[in-house]
Image (tube, rainbow, N blue to C red):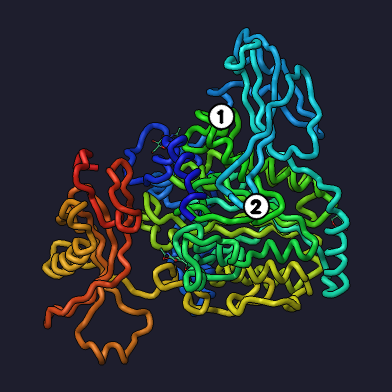
């Protein structure tokens, strides 16, 4: 597969600036500044007691999975992990957008020229079509440029993605406006096919309702960080729309792929790895888009970061588009256009990535307002690097929900807002709430109110399930149940053996029972007792952890680590004592250690088994790095870079 992958390399070079940023992660500690005052004031407006009460209830009601109570609005946390976030704008530093598309007319609005570019004269515009190359999701093809036009031009049925340039005079280098558009062609010739599939579903399975499914995913946002950084959307969901806030949503892994795969296909990453590797197409996973297409739903999937987000990280690829509406070719074209994608992927020319993507989704819903659809849009650019300013798109998301409501889409859809996983590193993870937050992504379900009134049991189940451990495998089963909806009964279809639909009343489960691996589990398993960090014991267990970290550090590429500082050491005692284990290893205790290393001040957390009498020790395999290497030279693949401070790094040794 080497040859077809070459375009990746070319595009990577073309957008080197973006690539560098996407690959680097946060470690800087910001000092409080004057701007923080706003954050504190804002925090006071939020009824913190309410969240506390809700969370405490969670704690009482749960037996198999107790969650440690952490206050999402503790002033120290808010100060550390939230930044004042004026709404993202991109129109101030780019050529004005003077064209727009309305009912397949591409129109010029010359009045827009005046405000932003002074006296720029206008001559004409041209457009060209962009399309994906069949069976190669890294390549795009362009049509010839159109004839020049001055006021409007009718787009053909073949136009799905277009690139428009406008010029000040006859010289084609004098561009005064540049735009890309994702259109939603109706493809009327397929109507009969979708209709007959819908009819087949109706006759064979007699589903009791037909709801659209609309999923908006935001990368790496914990539930608490969502509540803190997007207060407008959060309040709208919980107060105006009565959305279900799944307070105990867990995750199967710490990256997008390991959670979107179970959500969209019902497979765990470990399962597909038994028969698939990155060099092979991902089409074989069996995504539920196929289930929806078979049942007569039109489908859309869109990721905002065409080279590095969920299904593309690490040179992954598909042969065929996942869905019938798929604007990846346009994203590839925008990325390949020099200087068009800016601010770490947040801006596409004069448009914000968030509005661009949400408008594409809305266009799709509006175009098929009387047909069933299944749509998934994933946002990586805004939060991948840092979630502190996720609030810059709060307004956009809030407006999106309001539009859904105004246009009647909420009345016929299940709308899901979710994140794939909590933050693996950075300030949220390092903070005192980090362990829980890093394993608790947001999941909000919004159903039409008539639906909940009509199916009372489903409503009661959903409400109860917001307070028990849930996972993306459960969400997957729920979507299948909804596709062939039979009220609270299971739908009559082939199901994955894993996961339980959230439309049923879920039992109490341990992480293991919910297919959540131990190191991704936020359930409280240990009673933590702090150990004096200056004690002999603390120094011993820290030394063992350091030894293990050093053994994982590549000797030729990396500087040798020494201890920076011991941050914390806790003795961990099981909530429920394991007497067999205690008998087998008398005197052996478990310690959790957080420390930093030099040079580079990397921060790590690991667990060490230690018997202070026999001096036996063993370090657990899972060692988490709590910050990553922004600003450092990277000399190894990410997984190994985690344990490395590369030689030849000229960065200062402080932070
Ligand atoms: C991936 O699978 C292919 C086909 O089975 C095999 O040839 C290749 O060596 C594998 N690559 C890796 C990196 O495991
Ligand atoms: C892009 O990310 C870099 C890396 O930290 C950051 O310093 C910079 O402020 C970001 N740029 C914008 C415009 O957001
Ligand atoms: C919402 O949908 C229900 C069920 O289809 C319908 O009875 C009702 O009139 C709709 N409400 C609005 C405001 O469109
Ligand atoms: Zn992710």
Q: Is residue 66 above or below residue 347?
A: below
Of the residues tagged 1 and 2, which is closer to the observer? 2
Is label 1's Cβ within 8 Å of ligand 2? no
Q: Residue at x 55, y 51 (%)?
A: 218
Q: Position of residue 271 (x, y in %)?
A: 50, 73
Q: Residue at x 49, y 71 (%)?
A: 59
Query: Which sits in the foreground, 577 or 292?
Result: 292
Q: Is residue 337 left or right of residue 603?
A: right
Q: Is residue 521 above or below residue 550?
A: below
Q: CA distance from mark 1 to mark 2?
A: 24 Å
Q: Residue at x 43, y 59 (%)?
A: 438
Q: Is residue 188 left or right of residue 564?
A: right
Q: Residue furthest front?
A: 3
Q: Is residue 35 above or below residue 187?
A: above
User: What's the mark number on residue 90?
Assistant: 1
Q: Quadrant of the C terminus?
A: top left
Task: Give the residue number, with chain letter if any, for mark 2.
Answer: 301
The quarter of the picture showing ligand 3: bottom right
Which SS class for mark 2?
A: strand
Q: Residue at x 62, y 52 (%)?
A: 135
N-terminal label among 1 and 2: 1
């Amino acid at each position: 597969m080497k040859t077809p992958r070459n375009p990746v390399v070319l595009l990577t070079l073309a957008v080197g600036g973006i690539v560098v940023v996407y690959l680097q992660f946060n470690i800087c500690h910001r000092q409080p500044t004057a701007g923080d005052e706003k954050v504190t004031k804002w925090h006071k407006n939020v009824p913190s007691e309410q969240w506390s009460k809700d969370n405490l209830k969670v704690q009482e009601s749960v037996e198999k999975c107790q969650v440690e109570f952490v206050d999402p609005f503790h002033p120290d946390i808010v100060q550390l992990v939230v930044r004042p976030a004026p709404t993202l704008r991109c129109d101030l530093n780019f050529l004005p957008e003077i064209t727009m598309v309305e009912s397949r007319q591409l129109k010029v609005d010359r009045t827009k020229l005046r405000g932003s570019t002074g006296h720029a004269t206008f001559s004409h515009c041209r457009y060209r079509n962009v399309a994906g190359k069949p069976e190669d999701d890294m390549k795009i093809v362009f049509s010839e440029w159109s004839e020049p036009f001055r006021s409007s031009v009718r787009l053909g049925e073949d136009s799905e993605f277009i690139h428009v340039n406008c010029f000040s005079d006859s010289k084609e280098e004098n561009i005064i406006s540049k735009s890309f558009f994702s259109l939603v062609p109706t493809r009327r010739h397929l109507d009969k096919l979708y209709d007959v599939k819908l009819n087949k579903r109706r006759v064979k399975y007699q589903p009791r309702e037909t709801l659209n499914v609309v999923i908006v995913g935001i990368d790496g946002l914990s539930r608490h960080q969502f509540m803190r950084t997007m207060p407008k959307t959060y309040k709208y969901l919980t107060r105006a729309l009565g959305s279900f806030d799944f307070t105990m949503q867990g995750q199967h892994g710490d990256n997008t792929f390991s959670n979107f795969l179970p959500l969209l296909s019902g497979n765990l990453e470990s399962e597909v790895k038994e028969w698939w590797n990155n060099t092979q197409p991902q089409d074989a996973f069996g995504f539920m888009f196929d289930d929806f297409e078979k049942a007569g739903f039109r489908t859309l999937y869109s990721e905002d970061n065409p080279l590095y987000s969920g299904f593309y990280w690490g040179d992954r690829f598909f042969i065929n588009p996942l869905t019938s509406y798929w604007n990846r070719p346009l994203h590839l074209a925008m990325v390949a256009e020099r200087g068009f994608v800016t601010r770490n992927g947040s801006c596409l020319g004069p448009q914000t990535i968030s509005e661009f993507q949400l408008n594409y989704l809305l266009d799709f819903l509006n175009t098929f307002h009387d047909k069933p659809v299944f749509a998934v849009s994933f946002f990586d650019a805004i939060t991948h690097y840092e979630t502190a300013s996720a609030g810059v798109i709060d307004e956009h998301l809030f407006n999106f929900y309001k539009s859904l409501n105004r246009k009647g889409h909420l009345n016929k859809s299940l709308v899901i807002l979710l994140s794939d996983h909590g933050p693996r590193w950075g300030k949220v993870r390092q903070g005192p709430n980090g362990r829980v937050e890093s394993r608790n992504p947001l999941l909000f379900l919004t159903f039409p109110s008539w639906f909940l009134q009509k199916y009372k049991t489903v409503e009661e189940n959903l409400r109860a399930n917001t307070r028990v451990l849930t996972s993306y495998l459960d969400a997957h089963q729920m979507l299948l149940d909804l596709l062939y909806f039979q009220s609270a009964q299971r739908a009559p279809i082939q199901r994955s053996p894993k996961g339980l639909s959230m439309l049923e009343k879920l039992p109490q489960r341990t992480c293991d029972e919910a297919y959540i691996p131990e190191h991704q589990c936020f359930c409280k398993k240990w009673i933590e007792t702090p150990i004096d960090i200056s004690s002999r014991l603390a120094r011993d267990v820290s030394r063992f952890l350091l030894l293990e970290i050093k053994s994982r550090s590549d000797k030729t590429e990396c500087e040798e680590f020494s201890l920076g500082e011991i941050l914390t050491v806790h003795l961990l005692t099981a909530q429920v004592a394991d007497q067999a284990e205690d008998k087998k290893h008398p005197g052996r205790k478990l310690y959790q250690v957080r420390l930093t290393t030099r040079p580079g001040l990397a921060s790590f957390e690991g667990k060490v088994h230690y018997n202070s009498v026999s001096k036996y020790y063993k370090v657990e395999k899972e060692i988490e790095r709590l910050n990553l290497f922004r600003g450092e030279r990277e000399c190894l693949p990410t997984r190994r870079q985690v344990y490395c401070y590369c030689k030849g790094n000229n960065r200062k040794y402080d932070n």
